[in-house]
Image: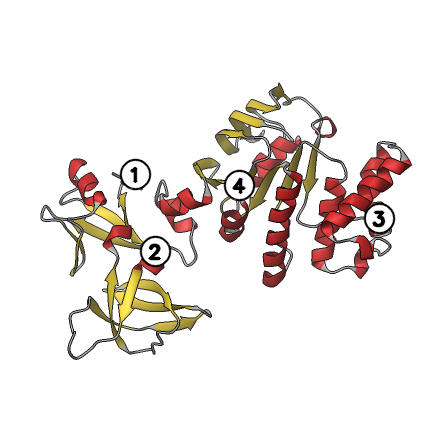
Amino acid sequence: MATMNLTNVNKIYPNGVQAVFDFNLDIKDGEFIVLVGPSGCGKSTTLRMIAGLEEISTGDLLIDNLKVNDQAPKDRDIAMVFQNYALYAHMTVYHNMAFSLTLRKEDSDKIHERVMWAAEVLGLIPYLNRKPRELSGGQRQRVALGRAIVRDPKVFLLDEPLSNLDAKLRGQMRKELKELHHRLGVTMIYVTHDQIEALTLADRIVVMKDGYVQQIATPEELYARPNNLFVANFIGTPPMNFFHAKIDSEGFVWIGAVKLDISSTKSYKALRSKEYFGKDIVLGVRPEHITIERPLKDKMDKGHLSKVELYELLGSDALVHFTIGSKNVVSKINSRVILHRGEEAYFDFDVSHLYYFDKETEVCIYE
């Protein structure tokens, strides 16, 4: 296990292209960190700099308070698991897992002990004499993890290790990875573009965009208090709904002709103190914070009337698509409420769960 500190780390290629800008992160001993963001955001480049596969242009990387910028990858005591498994096709599972220790010329009894321990942890005992071609994708991924575990490294680096698996197997492997981290207590840094993986696996998440860190937070904090418009849109499935809006001095926010009373919310006080009255802002609301009800004869005023454009059943939940003006909106409701295309329904927003963003800076406005 190990602590890790990245201070003002930059990556600039010889052609002048900069992939990572002023990356700063302090990682605790045994912490599970996930780097997440769209393709080209710099997350894999950052991982490769930690591994020593890419040179750090400027800045410092410390492992257990020792600067390792100039150390070779083999001297950093780091194990890396890749997307494509990188197993030796001619070797059995046992010898794939033992290979790194054999190269180190470790004692054969120690090699056997480490391989059998890792195989037991990962449920690979029945497959030790098989070749990779005889294994499923999930089993191959476990072998790749086992090969890393037997080395007993200070830090595990995982570069999109589940992206080649189908959806059901990814869910299973996420659970196994979380259990593995709990059992080993080792520092892990995991790269993915899948925000579901980030939310389910991480102790803390680093959200990146265009080489810059946008926010570092726990999954709960990231979901509840995004720093800016990008983070709010990237984290959450389905994504947050956004609207151009205005706030008046009487405590109402206007989305076109739709009026919402926010006078009793904490956010209203923040908007008032920061003088956002009358200004154009961006308003955000997550799908689960939009309620939908059918019109009732004795209760016609239940929100704002619209027509259902699409109803998607997800199991216990359902997504309802409708429009506000020309804006497409998605609501997430209990699937016991069944709606049909073209049916009229009333929607309403939970005003205690609205997000407000500065139109120019895209920063979220909090109290």
Secondary element at tag 4 = strand
Residue 195 as seen in the image, left or right of residue 83: left
Q: Residue at x 85, y 38 (%)?
A: 111
Secondary element at tag 3 = helix
- Residue assigned mark 1: 361
**Against 73, is 201 above or below?**
below
Nearer the camera: disc 2 or disc 1: 2
Q: Residue at x 44, y 69 (%)?
A: 316
What kind of colouring is applied to the model shown?
Answer: secondary structure
Q: Is residue 234 visible?
A: yes
Q: Looking at the image, tell me whether mark 2 or mark 3 is earlier in sequence order.
A: 3
Q: Looking at the image, tell me whether mark 4 or mark 3 is earlier in sequence order.
A: 4
Q: Residue at x 39, y 45 (%)?
A: 230
Q: Which amino acid type is shown beneath numbered disc 3?
A: Tyr
* Quadrant in the rendering for residue 131: bottom right
- Residue assigned mark 4: 35
Query: In 3D space, how far apart are the residues under numbered discs 4 and 3 (Cα atoms)?
Result: 31 Å
Nearer the camera: disc 4 or disc 2: 2
Residue extending farthest top? 66
Q: Which amino acid type is shown beneath numbered disc 2?
A: Arg
Q: Which amino acid type is shown beneath numbered disc 1?
A: Thr
- Residue assigned mark 3: 94
Q: Is residue 97 visible?
A: no
